[in-house]
Image: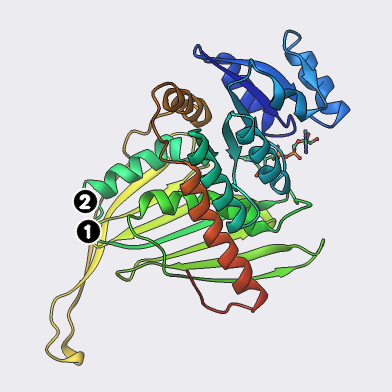
Amino acid sequence: MIRFGVIGYGYWGPNVVRNLDGLEESQVLAICDKSPAARRRAQKAYPGIPVTADAGELMSSTEIDAIAVVTPIWTHFELAKAALENGKHVFVEKPFTNTVAQAEELVNLAEHKNLKIMVDHTFLFTGAVKKIRQLLQEGTLGKLYYYDSTRVNLGLFQHDVNVIWDLAPHDLSIMDYLIDKSPEAVVATGQTHLNGFEDVAFVTVYFPEKIIAHINVNWLSPVKVRTTLIGGEKKMLVWNDLEPDEKVKVYDKGVSITSRQDLYELLVSYRSGDMWAPQVEQTEALRLELAYFIDCISNNHAPFNDGAAGLRVVKMLEAASQSLNKRGALIYL
Ligand SMILES: NC(=O)c1ccc[n+]([C@@H]2O[C@H](COP(=O)([O-])OP(=O)(O)OC[C@H]3O[C@@H](n4cnc5c(N)ncnc54)[C@H](O)[C@@H]3O)[C@@H](O)[C@H]2O)c1
């Protein structure tokens, strides 16, 4: 049994508490939130769990094995550091930290203390991403050409970060998981319209072997879109996360050049075959992720979405911020 303290009971925190409370191998011993309204909601939903405004109480508790940090990004480093210093494993929300230096410090601290960090890259535990990874690993798509994602909606405006730090960690963590190569460079452009933080942005990530990734993130979209195109030499796929059933569709489509002798004699042949929608697991991703975290702690395994994975995503985010400040300069990683 792993005993948790959860810090942050705003929008996402209740999902973490519900899943931890529902798993057989975990127990929530305390919930902490600075906001009285959040504490009232937590107390009403879980009358048996003590609720406090003081994170220090969770840190110093000898009963608690692990802390879930589900607070705004700027607080992650301080809270995760305190948890590690107090000998607790840490489940921390995405993006891991505000800076690369902070992420490195936490990774080193956890290693030194022999504690686990898991960064909540929830999408890696969805049936869709698992299926896409399987298709890539089995070679169904062939050599990867590109990853192109649109993740747009109206709001929710964040008060501490721009739209890249809010929404792009999802795609960056998915790319980190799917693409078996380290990114080489990042370009980001965007614009601020309302609260001083970029609300519309476009990020391009260059990988070796001509793999290119593009992410369109936007808080000013009239409609919600969660669509990713992944193109390979043999097949291409569309992942529409808003589809209730057939989220992933694989297309037997492609282009090949059959003659190269003379530029004017290039024979471009287009292949347009069948489309199929593979079966995708439906279990709630966060539940699977937290069960995996508990398993990693119990069996002393490093999670694949550990602090190092969180750090890789923060490196891309930091590079994107540098590029954004220079109106789209190429930043090498
Ligand atoms: N994995 C996902 O899919 C996913 C989805 C949504 C949000 N998130 C992440 O979860 C985190 C929280 O986001 P949210 O949308 O729930 O934010 P939120 O603002 O709705 O909630 C955060 C809560 O933390 C509390 N809080 C802040 N500082 C605190 C402190 N020092 N001690 C105790 N309580 C404190 C606030 O009072 C608030 O209730 C962010 O990092 C966000 O990126 C992840």
From the top left corner, tell me how far across and down residue 277 is, in percent: 33, 40
Question: Which residue is rendered at x = 14% and y = 76% of the image?
Answer: 258
Q: Which amino acid does label 1 sit on?
A: Lys
* View quadrant of ligand 1: top right
Q: In this view, does 143 lie above or below 102?
A: below
- The answer to whether 55 is drawn above or below residue 98 in the figure is above
Compared with 306, 58 (above or below) is above
Q: In which quarter of the image is residue 33?
A: top right
Relative horizontal placement of residue 144, taking residue 193 as reference (left or right): left
Residue shown at 66% from the left, 45% from the top: 77
Mark 2–mark 1 CB contact (< 8 Å): yes
Of residue 283 and residue 57, the one placed in the foreground of this image is 57
Residue at 55% x, 42% y is: 109
Q: Label for residue 155?
A: none
Q: Which of 46 and 301 is in front in this view?
A: 301
Picture residue at 73% right of the left edge, 22% below the top: 31
Residue for badge 2: 139
Residue 13 visible here: yes
* Image spot of residue 133 (x, y percent): 33, 45
Q: Where is residue 333 in the image (x, y as percent from the top left)?
A: 47, 68
Amino acid type shown at disc 2? Gly
